[in-house]
């Protein structure tokens, strides 16, 4: 048995062996969970995660980072933080292959409880989200058209209209 100290390499090795196991058994992985606790930090970079459900949990002054990660999942991505902890999402996207919808963001800082699906963000207890970048993109949940807006443009509106299907979608920026 060997131990890999670099968490990024450790994640990729574990992911490789899990994918290899799934290839031979014909079973798909169902749950991905990343938990940081007690003043720790974890980072996953430059990868795609394809699971039925995905969770990022940070507790007790800890943080998780996703850097250039694409999540393919049919259930909401659960982001949870407690006690001055954060989840950092940089060059992040979540895609629902069944609904064909997605959310893409350049940089997000999250606190509290949040769930993200391919076309929505749900806020739970003490949930907060900050879009660090001034440019935001996302797909229309009706026609899947890519919509690009700036954070400043959103701060003056309560509804966003798809340029393709003209569906108006309410939202709030705080």
Image: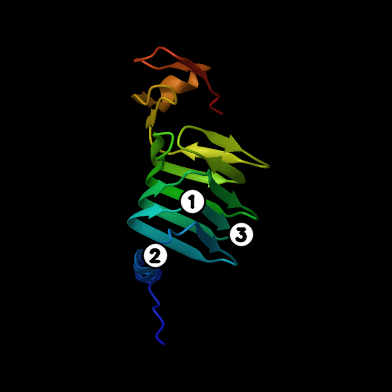
Could you say which is closer to the camera, residue 132 or residue 168? 168
Q: Which of the numbered marks, if any, corresponds to residue 22?
A: 2
Tell me the distance, in whole angstroms, between the alpha carbons under discs 2 and 1.
14 Å
Q: Earlier in the sequence, mark 1 or mark 3?
A: 1
The local secondary structure at tag 3 comes to loop
Give the residue at mark 1. Answer: 52
Tell me the distance, in whole angstroms, between the alpha carbons under discs 1 and 3.
23 Å
Q: Which of the numbered marks, if any, corresponds to residue 44?
A: none
Could you say which is closer to the camera, residue 27 or residue 120? 27
* Quadrant in the rendering for residue 104: top left
Could you say which is closer to the camera, residue 26 or residue 55? 26
Q: Where, quadrant-wise, is the C terminus in this rendering?
A: top right
Give the residue at mark 3. Answer: 59
* Quadrant in the rendering for residue 96: top left
Residue at figure coordinates x 40%, y 40% from the top left: 97
Residue at figure coordinates x 58%, y 39% from the top left: 128
Residue at figure coordinates x 37%, y 66% from the top left: 8
Q: Are marks 3 and 2 in contact (CB under 8 Å)?
A: no
Q: Are marks 1 and 3 in contact (CB under 8 Å)?
A: no
The local secondary structure at tag 1 comes to loop
Tell me the distance, in whole angstroms, between the alpha carbons under discs 3 and 2.
31 Å
Q: Earlier in the sequence, mark 3 or mark 2?
A: 2
């Amino acid at each position: 048995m060997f131990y890999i100290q670099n968490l990024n390499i450790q994640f990729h090795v574990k992911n490789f062996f899990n994918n290899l196991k799934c290839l031979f058994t014909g079973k798909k992985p169902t749950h991905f969970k990343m938990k940081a606790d007690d003043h720790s930090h974890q980072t996953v970079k430059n990868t795609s995660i394809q699971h039925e459900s995905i969770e990022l949990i940070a507790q007790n002054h800890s943080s998780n980072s996703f850097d250039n990660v694409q999540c393919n999942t049919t259930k909401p991505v659960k982001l949870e933080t407690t006690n001055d902890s954060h989840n950092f999402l940089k060059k992040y996207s979540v895609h629902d292959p069944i609904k064909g919808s997605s959310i893409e963001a350049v940089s997000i800082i999250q606190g509290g409880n949040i769930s993200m699906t391919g076309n929505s963000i749900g806020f739970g207890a003490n949930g907060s989200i900050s879009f660090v970048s001034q440019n935001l993109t996302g797909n229309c949940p009706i026609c899947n058209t890519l919509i690009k807006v700036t954070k400043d443009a959103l701060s003056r509106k309560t509804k966003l209209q798809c340029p393709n299907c003209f569906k108006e979608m309410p939202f709030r920026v705080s």
